[in-house]
């Protein structure tokens, strides 16, 4: 039996995942969490084999949550479920220690297959993501500049690249406008960008906007 913890801040999503898992005779949900901090206490108190982890939850942030999860439970297999496209978070998730990445628009059958694969110690990526990873290995480093950003820098990059103003980003991320401006400066410095137009062009060309 595969023991699963579901970590997602949307109750409807958690209920939907529980129904899918209930239809799989070799799986069971042992607990659930709605934010990053609860995830850590939950995995410490359960015999979970697989963690279904959402990217966008309240708490310390996705990559920091991943780091803490892996530090607390090296044996725990993590399958990331996200509404964000593979271009946005998949590579970052896998580099942070995730065992697989699946967007939430996939079928229940594919979710079950992904859970079984990571539980067996394998890595799960879709065919399209596997092709993209192979292409990334062949591409110039300049095409992957956003992978060098911290999680918060990456969030600021995506929001500014989607046309948000500094004030809008400030409100959405709970940061002061001055702090957002500092992150923007860091992003531009790391990526060699000079103007907002260049930043937006990069985000659009690399599919970082939903």
Image: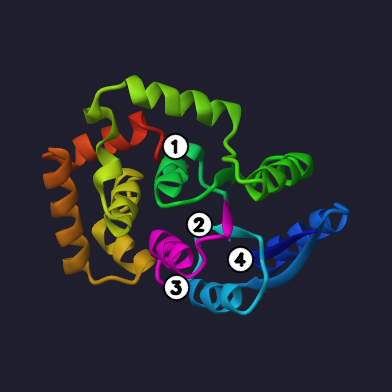
Q: In the image, which residues are magenta?
A: 60-79
The residue under the point 27% across, 28% down is 143
Find residue 81 and report its horizontal and vertical position in percent.
Answer: 59, 51
Question: In whole angstroms, how far apart are the C-alphas of marks 1 and 4?
Answer: 22 Å
Is the residue marked by circle 1 packed among few (<14), some (14-19), or many (20+) residues within 10 Å?
Answer: some
Question: In whole angstroms, how far apart are the C-alphas of marks 2 and 1?
Answer: 13 Å
Find residue 131 and report its horizontal and vertical position in percent.
Answer: 50, 23
Question: In whole angstroms, how far apart are the C-alphas of marks 2 and 4?
Answer: 9 Å
Residue 46 forms part of the magenta stretch: no
Q: Which residue is mark 3?
A: 59
Q: Which residue is mark 4?
A: 7
Find residue 74 and report its horizontal and vertical position in percent.
Answer: 50, 61
> Earlier along the polypeptide chain: callout 1 or callout 4?
4
Find residue 171 and report its horizontal and vertical position in percent.
Answer: 34, 68
Quadrant of the drawing holding the N terminus: bottom right
186 and 96: which is toward the camera: 96
């Amino acid at each position: 039996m595969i023991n699963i913890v579901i970590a997602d801040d949307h109750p409807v999503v958690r209920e939907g995942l529980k129904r899918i898992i209930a239809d799989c005779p070799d799986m069971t949900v042992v607990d659930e969490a709605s934010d990053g901090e609860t995830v850590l206490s939950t995995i410490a108190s359960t015999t979970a084999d697989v963690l279904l982890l959402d990217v966008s939850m309240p708490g310390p942030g996705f990559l920091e949550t991943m780091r803490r999860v892996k530090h607390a439970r090296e044996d725990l297999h993590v399958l990331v479920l996200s509404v964000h496209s593979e271009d946005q978070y998949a590579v970052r998730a896998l580099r942070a220690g995730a065992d697989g990445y699946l967007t939430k628009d996939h079928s229940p059958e594919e979710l079950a297959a992904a859970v079984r694969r990571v539980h067996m110690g394998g890595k799960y990526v879709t065919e399209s993501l596997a092709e993209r990873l192979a292409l990334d290995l062949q591409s110039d480093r300049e095409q992957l500049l956003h992978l060098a950003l911290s999680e918060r820098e990456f969030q600021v990059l995506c929001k500014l690249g989607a046309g948000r103003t500094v004030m809008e980003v400030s409100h959405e991320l709970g940061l002061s406008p001055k702090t957002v401006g500092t992150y923007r400066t860091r992003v531009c410095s790391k990526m060699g960008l000079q103007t907002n137009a260049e930043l937006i062009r990069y985000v659009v060309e690399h599919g970082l906007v939903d």
